[in-house]
Image (cartoon, coloured by chain):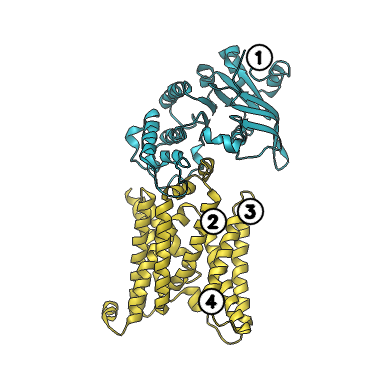
Amino acid sequence: MNRKPPIIKITNLDFSYHEHPVLEAVNLEIQEGELGSIVGPNGGGKTTLLKLILGLLQPDRGRIEIFGESPEKGRRKIGYMPQHAHLDPLFPVSVLNVVLMGQLGKQSGGLFGGYPHQALETARAALNEVGLSDCEKDSFHQLSGGQRQRVLIARALCTEPQLLLLDEPTANIDPRSEENLYETLVRLNRRMTILLVSHDLGFVSQVVKSVICVNRQVIIHPTSNINGTLIKEIYGGDFNLVRHDHRCDKDGHHPNKPAV
Amino acid sequence: MDFFHALADPDNTFLRLALAVGLLSSIAFGIIGTYVVTRRISYLAGAVSHCVLGGIGGALWLKAIFNVEWLDPVYGALLAALVAAFIVGRFGHNPGQREETMIGATWAIGMALGIIFIDLTPGYFDITSYLFGDILLVSSRDLKLIIALDLIIIFFVASCYHQLLAVCFDEEFARLRGLNVELFYQLLLALTAVTVVLLIRVVGIVMVVAMLTLPAAAASLYARRLSGMMLLAIFLSAISIVSGLGLSYNANLSSGPVIILFAGALYFLMAGWKKLYK
């Protein structure tokens, strides 16, 4: 098959915090159009992997290429949604102004001035995409947790990305919003590649095309080769590292190759 | 009201000057205070303000020992504040490096150096007005400097409002969008340092951080936008300064502490009001 070059290519990557290894011997390729879910136990390295892809952390060893460039350059094409817990919940700012931050760095001036008219349109379209058009004048701190999460997704969309990285978009939102979120993501996936960190196992089997398991090592499973029962068996109870390793031996799980 | 009669008295130029300095310094307190509160750098501002004493002491010492006539303490203060702002901005910002210990050390060392320099300087020198401020001692040169500071602050904020907003709201995201986060942060700290130096005249080294944080923190309880928070903080700090100046003049009290008590009372009243009625 004649494939396009991957938009994320990680080769032989090691990363450790204060000599405590977090990720080891990671090889990962993500193709354009992917809708992947990053799963794994807490402390297994999911957020670390996102931050390495974004160039916010530097690997000890190995290479990361984003759109064929270094993460520092390639990340301009990435729309990133962090967990909103690290933001000041009382910060006085309007919803529209939060979303507009996605347009920063796009103006030619860079340092000075406000947003051009075009930026406002992009921001409003992004708010519309997440169903919050009516809230643009509200204060960010008045919103519920789920609405804040959606505003941050809109901000990521407002960067006009080719790759969307979402860190726990399903954290603290109600089931109905979650349903809406899935529909939104499937719709967005027609235009862009999406990777998300998720604890939601139902979501994993429903809409994503592949599951990226992160626990020191990183292994990608196309969901077409894994049925729902198997996913529940593997991730439903305690994260079973032994069984996981057993399933994912070297021959069986090259990136993008079907599971054995 | 003695204070208002005294203001109208043609002989009391110093009082009108004090009032003008107080009102104009509210602009700097309100705007820079808003960033100090939302960016959570009041501890850094405290370290910067206390290091100012080191600069004042150093300048007095050099002036006395080496007969450097032009060396006004305010130059020493400015240099010390900018150096301290650079140090705490550059090294006090690494998560996991016990940043508050380093900031606290800068705070204490700066202040200790100031006292030692003043000890070494021949002659008697009263540092009370630097420590606690005396707005009645301001000169027309102070007034001009504060006008210049206000203009610089207004220009900076008007031209970089959205960038500063992004840096204060979510630094990581701002960095990902290609903003020079470190540059904005250092500029903000440098402006905070200059503000601290010029406004020490009003409330003194020990209390200047309170004037940077109390009106802005009170404003943040009710503001829906960063710009609204700035305007409300300017208004609250103007009320505190004018009331404090008036009461201290009438009751013959030190102006700095009375101003701070007004600002503190406003903060707690507004916080209590919000807790009860919102």
Hey, what amino acid is under mark 2?
Gln
Q: Chain of mark 4?
A: B
User: Which residue in the structure is indicated by mark 2?
Assistant: B186
Look at the picture and state if A107 lies above or below B157: above
- Label 2 – label 3 distance at C-alpha: 20 Å
Tag 3's secondary structure? Answer: loop
Q: Chain of mark 2?
A: B
- Which mark's residue is nearer the viewer, 4 or 3? 4
User: Which residue in the structure is indicated by mark 1?
Assistant: A259
For residue B259, what is the image quadrant?
bottom left
- Say the numbered circle drawn on residue B98: 3
Look at the picture and state if B157 lies above or below B144: above
Asked whether A109 or A55 is in front, the reply is A109
Quadrant location of the C terminus of chain A in the rendered image: top right
Residues marked 2 and 3 touching at CB (< 8 Å): no
Chain letter tied to yellow: B
User: Which residue in the structure is indicated by mark 4?
Assistant: B73
- Label 1 – label 2 distance at C-alpha: 51 Å
Residues marked 1 and 2 touching at CB (< 8 Å): no
Q: Are marks 1 and 2 on the same chain?
A: no
Hey, what amino acid is under mark 4?
Pro
Hey, what amino acid is under mark 3?
Arg
